[in-house]
């Protein structure tokens, strides 16, 4: 029997959702689906027939007969229907087109400052999306768009709220902007939540207690607990970058407070420290380049940043008891030094029962985590029972 919860990486739909079961690409009979979900066979048969009519599911052959007429098997029909995943970062924008299995069919990216504002950034997104859809003959097959933004997002509305590094974006209606252009639902979330979904789906399937930490221009985390993405009451759960760290009590953060983790351990903070040491460095990318080049001062600074991050994650370990902690972002990918610093503190300070089987690892998915997670967000919505019912009603 399939682990249904493990399939539901987004964690906010019933585990009985037939789509989430069929998303793994494995063909199943109506009887198998009824057994997995606990639904009546007549209910499963009706829903499968509806999905076939919509072209979302298709018969793929017959099961091995155990006597009598063999039963038909069904699987997700990934051809023809697509979603778009959008990853907007502090200094980049990426977009990908994916089929309903989550496979990325094509993508595009551009170096662009999010500070240029929503009209400029979303204008590029809309143009690139139109070109990708046309290139893959999917102009009429788009079902939904998932978007990750580098700042706090109110989950219920999809609006960015007081984002520190996104001037001009506060309460900007991203779902409406793209929705009017493409005529499909647009789902928006914080970029680190998106990365957590993508990293888990691609590299840690079935891990139900998982923390993804992004360390780049800022610091944030996406938390999956019990198989569910934890967004909290307004969508800001996991914002560890603004947790107070006593050693930074005199350092002002861009949020206006003093002593935030981000203010002393993110890429710009490390760059500031290195400039004070006499090195010519301006950005997170410069820090990463120095570390990769073997600069001892930069390596030591990044390792110390890892220790500071580890201090905050030690509290997270006690609160959430994750099975896996993954570090991603440009600073984490500069080498093992950030990871080593975090491990040093977490394994020393946390209770043995919590760390006995705890894995602390570098991101395996890299830049694709965000775009994969954004695509998953769109797929989940596009294939929800409510959306299927809406599509059926429009026939």
Image (cartoon, rainbow, N blue to C red):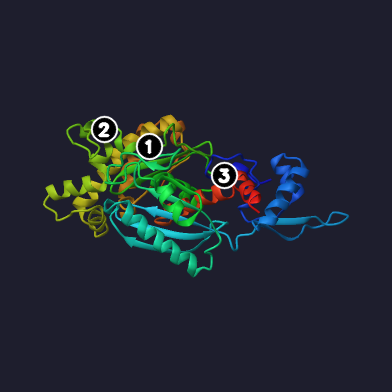
The residue tagged 1 is: 347
| Badge number at residue 245 | 2
Q: Position of residue 338 (x, y in %)?
A: 31, 47
Q: Residue sitting at 36 percent across and 58 percent down?
A: 123
User: Which of the 4 quarters of the picture holds residue 154?
Assistant: top left
Q: Position of residue 239 (x, y in %)?
A: 35, 37
Tell me, yes or no, if residue 369 can be seen here: no
The N terminus sits in image quarter? top right
**For marks 2 and 1 on the same chain, the one whose residue lies earlier in the sequence:** 2
**For marks 2 and 3 on the same chain, the one whose residue lies earlier in the sequence:** 3
Q: Secondary structure at mark 1?
A: helix
The C terminus sits in image quarter? bottom right
Q: Position of residue 43 (x, y in %)?
A: 74, 43
**For marks 1 and 3 on the same chain, the one whose residue lies earlier in the sequence:** 3
Q: Are marks 2 and 1 in contact (CB under 8 Å)?
A: no
Q: Residue sitting at 12 percent across and 47 percent down?
A: 276
Q: Are marks 2 and 3 in contact (CB under 8 Å)?
A: no
119 displayed left or right of 65: left
| Badge number at residue 8 | 3
């Amino acid at each position: 029997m399939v682990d249904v919860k493990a399939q539901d990486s987004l964690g906010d739909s019933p585990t009985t959702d037939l789509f989430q079961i069929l998303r793994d690409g494995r063909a199943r009979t109506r009887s198998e689906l009824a057994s997995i979900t606990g639904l009546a066979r007549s209910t499963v048969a009706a829903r499968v027939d509806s999905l076939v009519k919509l072209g979302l599911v298709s018969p793929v052959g017959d099961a091995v007969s155990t006597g009598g007429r063999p039963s038909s098997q069904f699987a997700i029909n990934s051809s023809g229907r697509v979603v778009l995943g959008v990853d907007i970062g502090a200094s980049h924008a990426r977009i990908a087109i994916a089929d309903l299995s989550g496979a990325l069919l094509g993508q595009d990216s551009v170096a662009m400052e999010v500070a240029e504002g929503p009209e400029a950034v979303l204008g590029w997104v809309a143009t690139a999306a139109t070109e990708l859809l046309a290139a893959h003959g999917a102009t009429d097959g788009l079902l939904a768009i998932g978007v990750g933004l580098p700042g706090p997002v109110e989950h219920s509305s999809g609006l960015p709220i007081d984002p520190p590094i996104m001037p001009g974006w506060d309460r900007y209606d991203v779902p409406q902007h793209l929705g009017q252009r493409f005529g499909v639902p647009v789902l928006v979330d914080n970029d680190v939540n998106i990365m957590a979904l993508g990293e888990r789906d691609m590299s840690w399937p079935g891990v139900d207690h998982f923390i993804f930490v992004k360390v780049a221009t800022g610091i944030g985390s996406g938390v999956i607990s019990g198989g569910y993405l934890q967004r909290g009451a307004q969508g800001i759960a996991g914002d560890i970058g603004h947790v107070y760290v006593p050693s930074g009590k005199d350092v002002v953060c861009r949020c206006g407070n003093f002593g935030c983790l981000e203010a002393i351990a993110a890429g710009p903070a490390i760059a500031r420290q290195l400039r004070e040491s006499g090195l010519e460095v301006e950005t997170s990318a410069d820090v990463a380049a120095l570390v990769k080049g073997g600069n001892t001062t930069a390596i030591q600074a990044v390792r110390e940043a890892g220790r500071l991050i580890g201090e905050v994650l030690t509290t997270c370990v006690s609160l959430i008891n994750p099975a896996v902690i993954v570090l991603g972002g440009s600073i984490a990918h500069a080498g093992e030094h950030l990871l080593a610093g975090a491990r040093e503190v977490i394994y020393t300070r946390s209770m043995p029962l919590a760390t006995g089987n705890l894995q602390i690892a570098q991101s395996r998915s890299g830049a694709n985590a965000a775009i994969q997670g954004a695509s998953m967000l769109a797929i989940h919505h596009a294939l929800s029972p409510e959306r299927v019912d809406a599509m059926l009603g429009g026939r």
